[in-house]
Image (cartoon, rainbow, N blue to C red):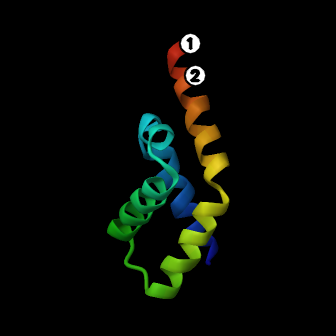
Amino acid sequence: MTPSMLRQLWSLVETTQASTLVNLDDASLVQCLLKQFNKEAAINGKEAALLRDYICSRISLIRDLAEARLSGDASA
């Protein structure tokens, strides 16, 4: 996976509604991010598989970041 793909994915995580990231089950969260990523940049099957594996390995971090955003919104 390229550095550009990583930057794009984490940008996508930051711009996706935090409540969506927190409330979806793992499989739906992965599919949601892959679908959104593919809208922005067409990727081939190999890249999609790498991205899927990477997202799966970072689910906890993605949810933690989303929960922190929700907590920040509540305290603002």
Amino acid carrying mark 1 in the image: Ser
Asked whether, in this view, residue 1 is left or right of residue 30, the answer is: right
| Residue for badge 2 | 71
Q: Position of residue 48 (x, y in %)?
A: 48, 77
Q: Residue at x 52, y 87 (%)?
A: 46
Q: Position of residue 12 (x, y in %)?
A: 47, 54
Q: Position of residue 23 (x, y in %)?
A: 45, 38
Which of the two residues, 68 or 49, is positioned nearer the viewer here?
49
Against 16, residue 8 (above or below) is below
Against 27, residue 13 (above or below) is above
Against 36, residue 43 (above or below) is below
Circles 1 and 2, Cβ within 8 Å, touching? The answer is yes
Amino acid carrying mark 2 in the image: Ser
Q: Residue at x 54, y 70 (%)?
A: 52
Q: Alpha-carbon neighbours of circle 2 within 10 Å: few (<14), some, or many (≥20)?
A: few
Q: Residue at x 48, y 58 (%)?
A: 27
Q: Distance between the Cα atoms at labels 1 and 2?
A: 6 Å
Against 72, residue 50 (above or below) is below
Picture disc at residue 75: 1
Asked whether, in this view, residue 6 is left or right of residue 27, the answer is: right
